[in-house]
Structures are given as C-alpha cells and as structure tokens.
Image: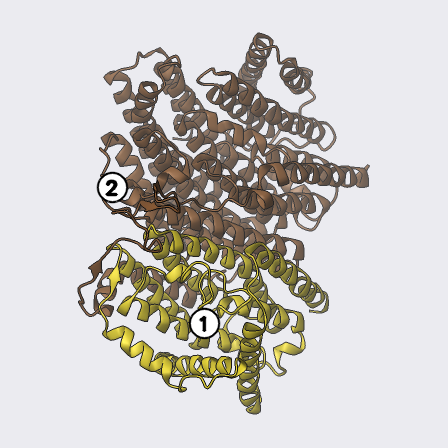
Chain colours: A yellow, B brown
C-alpha cells in the first residue's frame, strides 16, 4: 500500500517538479546571457501546445518506440521511488534509452541517425559510472535497495566522495547539458538540427519532453540518495544539495562549449576510473 | 539411456557419412535429432525424479583399451592432415600428448578407482543444452547447407561428411559431460578438438585450411596441458577422476598443478585471450558450424570444465589466473566487437567476451558466482545460437551478413528482423536472461571483493551495450518504398529459429525454476552450504512486470497518443530531399544517394589498434601467473 502511494506521488509530482526545474533552467540561462527569459511556467505552456498538435512522423513504428521510451522511463522512476533495487533501476533505464535510440534509427534520417549513434556513445560513456555508483552504495550500506540505503546512520557521501564527483560528471551527460549535449540539445546552436529528436513532433515529441522531466527528477533523486539518512533534516539537506547540483549543471551548461564525442568518452571513462575506481578500492579495503 | 546418448550420435554419424545427399538423408537427420531430444528429455526427467548423483562403471579395462586405440587413431588422423598440408607442428603437438598417455596406460601406471561416469545436476543441464540447442542447429543445417552449396558452387559438396561431423560433435559433448574419469574426459575433449578442425576446414579453401590449423594447434596445446595434468594427477597424486581432484584441491595447495593445467586447457577451448583467434577464424565455416561451436558445444566444454573445477579455484593463484584472464577477455573482446561490421564477427567477439565472463565467474569459485556462471552458460547458448541461425538465414536471403547491409531489415525480412531483435535483446537487455546473470555476476564480484573484475565488468558491459544497440538500430530502420524480399527459408529452418526465439523468451520467465530445481541443488552439493536467492523475489516480480509491460506496450502507446492520426512525411534532409528519403540534392545541384552508416570507431577500438596489445598482455599475464602458481608449489 505504501509503495502504491509512493508510486502515485511520483507519477503526479515528478512532472510538476521536472517542468519547474526546466523553467528555472531557462530563466537562469537567459539571465546568464543578459536576457529577461520566459516565465517560469513556460515549459508547461510549451508542453500543452505540443500535446494539442498533430504529430508528423516518418513511419509507423516511431511513435510506438517513443511510447516504449516514455513508459519505461516512468517505470524506472517508479522502481526508484518505491524503494527498489538500484541496479534494476539502471537496467530499466537502459531499456528505455534503447527504445529512444531505436525510434531515432527507425526514421532513416541523417540527423536523427547521427543523433542515435551519438546517444549510444553517451550511454557507453556514462554507464560504467552509474553501475559503480550503485556498487558503492551496496558496499557502503550493504544493500542495493533504495528503501534500505536511506536507512543509514550517516550520509553515504561521507564514504563515497569520489563516486559523488563521478556521478556529477555523468549527470551533465544525462541532463543533456553542454559540453556533453552531443546527441540532442536544447540550445539552438547545434550542427545537426535536433539530433535524436529531429524527426519527432507534436504529441510524440511531447512524450519525449515529459519523459525527460521524469528522468531529471529521477536523476536528482539519485543525487539526493548520497545525502539522505535516518536524520529528519537530511531530507532538507538532500533537497538543498539537489538544487545546488542542478544550479551547477546550468552553470556548466552555459559556460562550456560542446566537445567532440571522443573527448567526452575519454574524459568520462577517465573520471570514472580515477574517481570511481579509487573510491571503490578504498571502500573495499575499509569494509 | 546414458549409453545410448553417448553412443547413438556416433552411430548416426557413421550412417550419415554413407548416405548420399537427398530426401532420405534429411529425414534421417530429423529423425536422429528427434530421437536425441526425446532421450535427453527422458533422461533429464528421470534424473530429476530418481534423485541425482548416480555413478556407473567402476571397472572398464576393455573400454579403456578401446579408447586408447581410438586416441592413437585420432593421432594418426592429425598426422595425416598435418603432413598433407605440411603443418608439422600439429603432428608434433599431438604426438607429445598422446604418446605419454598411451605409455602411462600401457605400463599400468595410471591411477585406478572411482567411477567413470557420474551424473549430477550440472550434467543434466549440460545435456539439455547440448541436446536441445545442438539438435536444433542440426535441423537448421539441413536447409542451410543446401542453400549454401547453391550460393557457392565453387566448393565441393561434402555435406554428408558435414552432418556426420556434427553428430560426432554432439556425441563427444555428451561423452564429455557424462565422464568423470580424467582420461575419458580427455578422450572426448580431443574428439571435439579434431572435429572442430575438420568442420572449420569444410570448404577446403585456403583460408579455411589456414584457420582450421590455427584452431587445431591452439586446441592441441590445451590438450597437451590436459595430458600433463592427467599424468601428474595419476602418477603423483594417484587420482583418476575429476571429482576427487576437486575435493583434494579445495582449500589446499597439493592439487594446484593439475588444476592449473586443466584450467589452461579450458581457457584454450573457450577461446579466451590469448587463444581467441581460433574462434574468429572459425567463421569461414558454414553457419551451423559456427553456431554449434559458439553456443552449444566446443567453447562450452571449456567453461563446463572450469565450473567443475571452481571449488578448487577459490582463493588460490589458479583462481586468480582464471579470473584475470576471463575478466580481461570480457572487457577486451567487447571493445573489439565495436569496430566490427561483419555480423558473424561481432557474434564471435561477443561469444569470446561472454565466455570470459563465465570463466571469471568460475574462477571466483564462490557459490553465487558459479550460479551466475551456469545461468550465463544456458542463456548464452540459446541466445547466441538464435543469433547465428538468423544471421545465416539473412545471409542466405540477401547474400550478405554485413550489419550495414541489414539496414531496413524490418521492412525487407520482417520475420527474421523480429527474431533477431528478440535474440539481441536476449543478449543485453533487461529483463532477458543474459542481463540477469550479468547482474548476479556483478554482485558476486563485489562480494568477493575483486575490484579488477568489477572494473572490467562495468566497462565491458558498457561497450557491449554500444555494439548491440547500434545493431538494433540498423534492424529497425524503415525505408520508404523498399520491397519485401522473398522468403527463401525452408520450414525446418523456421522451426529451429522460432523454437530458439521461444526458448529465449520462455527462459526469461522460467529461469527461477531452472535455478531452484537444477542449479541450486548442484551448488549445494558442490559447496556444502545453502545460499539465499541471488536475485530477490521482489526484483523478479519487477522484472516480470517489465516483461508484461513490453507485451502490452502496443496497447499502451495507442492510449498515449489518444488515437490521433499521424501525418506521414519523408525524413528531413535540410530541405534538399529529392522525392524520397534516400536521395538528396547536393551542393552541385546533383542528385546524390544517401548512405547511413553505423559508427565503428576504428581509430579507438579497431583490431589494428587493440588486438595485438591485448593478446600480448593476456599472454604475458597467463605465462607469469602460471609460472608463479606452479613455481610456488615446486
């Protein structure tokens, strides 16, 4: 029953939160550039408009595959917020991503095909760090389950600083922020139109946007997991850290130019190996 | 029943070698396959009902003599081929292992005692894998080989020989998994080596012969290790069968020399680095051969032996050698697979890499690691044979097995594309089999505190994701106005392919049963302790929910899009399309056709770049670890 409530809460609150975050992002981004920026609720207006539009597709399987992406992103979020297994969360997220990539490849379009390949490189780049972070939680708390991880006495970040840093690094990829927004970007200055989502429009594109909001909340939830413990105030601390991290990502997004894919892959793997690997080594020696 | 499983395939092979190509022979192949599958099923059921662990044949003087003769015959065969093709080193290797064994047997120095045949749960699992998957491949081979010779008129039709070799292979595998006596295992081990040599060289082209000799010498080198292990355990330890060897080797150093030599033999057979090249060379053979070598037999013999040895590998240098080589192979082979566009080559690298994972699991020697290893073995056999058979079918239908040419397969050959999607998902996606066992392996590596393995696994599985993901993308591309190709497959081919696809899906639902009734009892007996479920029941429920979600996805998507009519257009090419989604107007105003290629990242992961360093690294690691381990005892 409790799990059901959590799932329902996630289903309702996550898009609200995600949309607000996105509005916040646009506002801050505009201020960085000395513009006024759109109203905070602009993402909701945009989404509403997208949903009311007819979708223009290039084939019959595209919307099906995007639907798969949408459903599994939400599914993943539900596993996480219901207190499920972290590894399973990542595996389900991988499945969702594969759906999105298949939809982009199915379009037989140069821009979306390139976006799909780049998205695969992105996945290859961030996947090791994600798994390592989950392993770090397991060694530190003795469980892969979110519901048990939050019941630790001290915040996990105390023993997982390297993992936390590595996770922040890949968060830039996952949130599609520059310098790592190579497969698709919300910035206009991109050389390959909209990459992954070039061939999507109308209500199908709206599903991708909405799924993105759910995913952002899930990722910030993961950031919060580093902080949350048995103390009540840890929840406030976690929220503060999440906001701080999100702000940091916006900052990085506006500060750095986009890099080439090989730079992204190389640097991410290096950070994973050094920050994650050393943290893991120390952790195994201690526990 | 055991005897019939061990003997019948050989008889069938003998009859097949005399039959001429035609209806009669095809019928005979089908009938033999049905018979083998029925016997395997009956055997498994009876083993499950009547309790496990039966052992037979304590006194086998006469049989041993017969085997010795056959072994000398095999040596003669190797001599014949190596002199014919002037590859003398193969003859040397063969003589170096067969003659000492023969001397040991004839001079009565071999250890006696213990039963020669032992049946336990692992035997039952292996029997089902070999019997069911192996027979499905044989059934598929009937239609395939006919089409193969239509496409390749330049090769001589030796298909009767081909079928008889397939059955010899199955027989040898059954023999291998039933045997407990080391000399017996060695005998069947050698048969599989020589059989694979003959099968790889099937079409007698120059490349085929070169590759078959590479397979031969690498496997004979492993055989040499096996032979020395037998000599040592027989003459120094006075041990004749593998169970006793493992019992002795668990927790003590006395048996480490034979254990490490057997592990070395297993590494060559499972094509672990630095011996991976023979398996890649094996692609020149017709597809059923590759399917058989990669999924149900040959390479599985190696990991089977490692799983048997695993308690003796726990916490010693032999174990470290096996896990290091296995983990490294998993990582390096999955990187190498990224740069390949030949479908079969990607499959080959993926086999090597997955076997590396099984090897690493066995080398860890912990309860849950071996659990993961056995499940990986089963899942891999089914998914990989499905992939090989469908790639072979695509090759027969379109004339190419290049992944680039599979662009838009979902329109051209929808049924094949669909089974390939199932097969690929089975290889790396949740909630399918391989992923579950990879998950368990990861947990086991973490629990055994092997950081190196954990690192290899996380990076290796990321690259695995890349090469399967881009293959999936190629399959689902929908090109406007492309035609469906005629279905050239025979009914028997479809039967094999569909059955395997069904098995991939069915296993993902039913693997908890497999685990409870076969794997767990075997492990309890092997490690003398009970283990809590490796994957908790709530996770299983979640995964089942995932599978259901995939099944009802079409309905959900209909609901999500609110029944809106989509407008279909052609894809965007900067406004320069010329009429369809395949041509565009270039900057000279000319019409140019578009070609979408996957990424292969040759500069980073190409064979030229990383194959040699990884082979050198693996060889160095293997040699150093072996010397240290053996030297430590002497």
Q: In percent of the image, x 21 and y 65: which residue is there?
A: B558
On the image, numbered disc 2 is attached to which residue? Answer: B482
Please tell me whether mark 2 or mark 1 is closer to you in this view: 2
Q: Secondary structure at mark 1?
A: loop
Question: Mark 1 — on which chain does it sit?
Answer: A
Viewer-side residue, A193 vs B27: A193
Query: Mark 2, residues whose alpha carbon is within 10 Å: few (<14), some, or many (≥20)?
Result: few
Image position of A275 (left or right of B557): right
On the image, numbered disc 1 is attached to which residue? Answer: A84
Q: Is residue B19 visible?
A: yes
Query: Mark 1, residues whose alpha carbon is within 10 Å: few (<14), some, or many (≥20)?
Result: many
Question: Mark 2 — on which chain does it sit?
Answer: B
Image position of B121 (left or right of B370): left
Viewer-side residue, B295 vs B561: B561
Q: Secondary structure at mark 2?
A: loop
Quarter of the picture holding the N terminus of chain A: bottom left
Question: Badges 2 and 1: C-beta atoms under 8 Å apart?
Answer: no
Q: In percent of the image, x 55 and y 74: which residue is there?
A: A254
Residue B63, how many percent across, how many down?
A: 52, 19
Q: In percent of the image, x 29 and y 40: which residue is there?
A: B416
């Amino acid at each position: 029953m409790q799990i059901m409530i959590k799932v329902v809460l996630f289903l309702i609150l996550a898009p609200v939160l995600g949309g607000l975050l996105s509005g916040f992002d646009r506002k801050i981004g505009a201020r960085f550039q000395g513009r006024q920026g759109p109203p905070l609720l602009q993402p909701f207006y945009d989404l509403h408009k997208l949903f009311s539009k007819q979708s223009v597709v290039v084939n019959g399987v595209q919307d099906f595959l995007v639907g798969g992406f949408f459903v599994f992103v939400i599914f993943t979020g539900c596993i996480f917020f219901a207190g499920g297994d972290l590894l399973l969360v990542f595996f389900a997220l991988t499945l969702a991503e594969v759906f999105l990539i298949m939809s982009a490849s199915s379009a037989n379009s140069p821009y979306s095909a390139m976006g799909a390949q780049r998205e695969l490189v992105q996945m290859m780049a961030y996947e090791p760090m994600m798994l390592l972070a989950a392993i770090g939680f397991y060694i530190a708390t003795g469980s892969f389950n979110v519901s048990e991880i939050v019941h630790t006495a001290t915040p996990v970040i105390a023993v997982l600083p390297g993992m936390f840093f590595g996770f922040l690094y890949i968060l830039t990829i996952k949130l599609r922020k520059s310098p790592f927004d190579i497969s698709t970007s919300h910035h206009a200055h991109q050389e390959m139109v909209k990459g992954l989502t070039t061939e999507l429009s109308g209500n199908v594109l709206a599903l991708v946007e909405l799924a993105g909001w759910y995913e952002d909340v899930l990722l910030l939830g993961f950031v919060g997991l580093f902080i949350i413990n048995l103390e009540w105030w840890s929840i406030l601390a976690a929220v503060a850290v999440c906001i701080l991290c999100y702000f940091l990502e916006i900052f990085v997004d506006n500060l750095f130019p986009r890099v080439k894919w090989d730079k992204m892959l190389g640097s991410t793997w290096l950070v994973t190996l050094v920050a994650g690997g050393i943290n893991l080594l120390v952790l195994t020696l201690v526990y | 029943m055991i005897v019939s499983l061990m003997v019948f395939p050989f008889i069938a092979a003998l009859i097949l070698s005399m039959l001429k190509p035609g209806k009669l022979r095809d019928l005979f192949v089908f009938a033999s396959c049905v018979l083998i599958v029925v016997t395997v099923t009956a055997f498994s059921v009876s083993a499950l009902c009547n309790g496990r662990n039966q052992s037979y044949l304590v006194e086998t003087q006469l049989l041993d003599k017969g085997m010795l003769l056959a072994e000398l015959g095999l040596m003669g065969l190797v001599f014949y081929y190596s002199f014919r093709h002037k590859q003398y080193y193969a003859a040397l290797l063969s003589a170096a292992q067969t003659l000492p064994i023969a001397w040991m047997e004839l001079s009565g120095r071999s250890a006696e005692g213990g039963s020669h045949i032992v049946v336990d749960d692992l035997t039952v699992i292996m029997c089902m894998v070999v019997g069911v998957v192996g027979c499905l491949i044989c059934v598929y081979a009937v239609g395939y080989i006919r089409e193969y010779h239509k496409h390749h008129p330049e090769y001589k039709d030796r298909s009767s020989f081909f079928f008889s070799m397939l059955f010899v292979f199955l027989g040898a595998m059954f023999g291998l998994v039933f045997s407990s006596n080391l000399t017996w295992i060695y005998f069947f081990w050698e048969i599989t080596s020589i059989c694979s040599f003959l099968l790889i060289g099937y079409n007698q082209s120059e490349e085929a012969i070169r590759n078959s000799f590479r397979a031969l010498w690498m496997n004979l080198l492993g055989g040499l290790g096996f032979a020395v292990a037998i000599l040592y355990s027989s003459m120094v330890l006075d041990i004749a069968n593998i169970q006793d060897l493992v019992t002795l080797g668990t927790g003590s150093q006395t048996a480490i020399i034979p254990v490490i030599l057997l592990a070395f033999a297993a590494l060559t057979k499972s094509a672990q680095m630095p011996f991976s090249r023979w398996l890649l060379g094996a692609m020149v053979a017709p597809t059923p051969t590759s399917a058989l070598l990669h999924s149900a037999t040959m390479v599985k013999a190696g990991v089977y032996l490692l799983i048997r040895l695993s308690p003796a590998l726990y916490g010693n240098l032999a174990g470290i050698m096996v896990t290091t080589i296995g983990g490294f192979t998993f990582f390096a082979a999955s990187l190498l697979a990224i740069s390949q566009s030949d479908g079969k080559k990607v499959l080959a690298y993926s086999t090597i890499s997955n076997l590396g994972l099984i090897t690493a699991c066995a080398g860890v020697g912990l309860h849950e690691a071996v659990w993961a290893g056995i499940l990986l073995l089963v899942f891999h056999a089914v998914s990989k044979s499905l992939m090989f058979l469908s790639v072979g079918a695509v090759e027969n239908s379109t004339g190419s097995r290049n992944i680039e040419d599979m662009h838009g397969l979902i329109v051209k050959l929808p049924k094949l594309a669909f089974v390939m999607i199932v097969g690929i998902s089975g290889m790396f996606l949740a909630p399918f089999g391989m992923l579950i066992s990879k998950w368990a392996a990861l947990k086991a590596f973490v629990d055994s505190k092997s950081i190196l393995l954990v690192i290899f696994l996380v990076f290796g599985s990321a690259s695995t994701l890349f090469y399967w993901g881009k293959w999936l993308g190629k399959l689902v591309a929908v090109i406007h106005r492309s035609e469906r190709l005629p279905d050239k497959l025979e009914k028997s081919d479809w039967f094999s392919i569909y059955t395997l696809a069904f098995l991939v899906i069915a296993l993902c639902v039913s693997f908890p049963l497999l685990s409870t009734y076969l794997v767990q009892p075997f492990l309890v007996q092997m490690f003398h302790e009970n283990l809590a479920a490796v994957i908790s029941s709530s996770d299983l429920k979640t995964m089942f929910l995932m599978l259901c979600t995939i099944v009802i996805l079409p309905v959900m998507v209909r609901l999500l899009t609110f029944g809106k009519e989509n407008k279909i257009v052609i894809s965007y090419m900067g406004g320069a399309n010329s009429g369809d989604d395949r041509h565009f107007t270039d900057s000279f105003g000319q019409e140019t056709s578009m070609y979408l290629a996957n990424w292969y990242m040759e500069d980073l992961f190409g064979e030229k770049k990383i194959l040699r360093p990884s082979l050198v690294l693996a060889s160095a690691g293997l040699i150093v670890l072996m010397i240290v381990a053996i030297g430590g005892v002497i």
